[in-house]
Image (spheres, grey):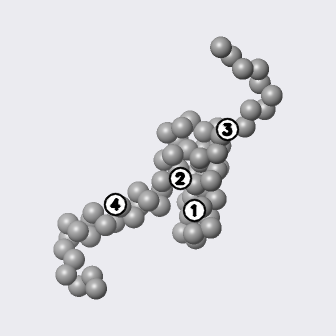
Amino acid sequence: MFSRIGPFEALVLGVAIVALYLAPSVIAFRRGHPRRLLVLTINLVLGSTLIGWAIALYLATRPAPDHGRPATM
C-alpha cells in the first residue's frame, strides 16, 4: 500500500497527521481559551485515543465560562 511513497510524500503525510492530532490545542490557543493548558494536556496525553482527541476538541470549541463577571461595553 505505501511501498511507492517517496520521502516528500512521507513528509507531507507526517505533517498532516501531526496537524490533525494537534488541532484541538491549536484551536484553543488561537481562541485564547482560558483552559487552553488543560486542552493541551488532554490532547498530548489522551489524544492518541479517539475519545481523548474528541474531548480535547470539545473543550477547545466550547465557549469560555463566564464566572459571573459583568459584561463590558
Distance from label 2 to label 3 (Cα)? 15 Å
Is the C-beta separation of discs 2 and 3 under 8 Å? no
Q: Residue 16, located in which quarter of the rendered image?
A: bottom left
Let me know if residue 42 appears in the view: no
- Mark 4 or mark 2, which has the lower sequence index? 4
Which quarter of the rendered picture does the C terminus lie within? top right
- Mark 3 or mark 4, which has the lower sequence index? 4
Is the C-beta separation of discs 2 and 1 under 8 Å? yes
Kind of residue indicated by mark 1:
Trp
Classify residue 8 as left or right of residue 13. Answer: left
- Mark 2 or mark 1, which has the lower sequence index? 2
Front one among 41 and 4: 4
Name the residue beneath numbered marker 4: 15
Kind of residue indicated by mark 2:
Pro
Is the C-beta separation of discs 3 and 4 under 8 Å? no
Kind of residue indicated by mark 3:
Ala
Vertical placement of residue 34 versus 53, above or below: above
x, y percent for residue 62: 64, 45
Distance from label 4 to label 1 (Cα)? 17 Å
Is the C-beta separation of discs 1 and 3 under 8 Å? no
x, y percent for residue 56: 60, 56
x, y percent for residue 36: 60, 44
Q: Residues within 10 Å of mark 1 (few under 14, many from 20)?
A: many
Name the residue beneath numbered marker 3: 64
Classify residue 62 as left or right of residue 69. Answer: left
- Mark 2 or mark 3, which has the lower sequence index? 2
Is the C-beta separation of discs 4 and 2 under 8 Å? no
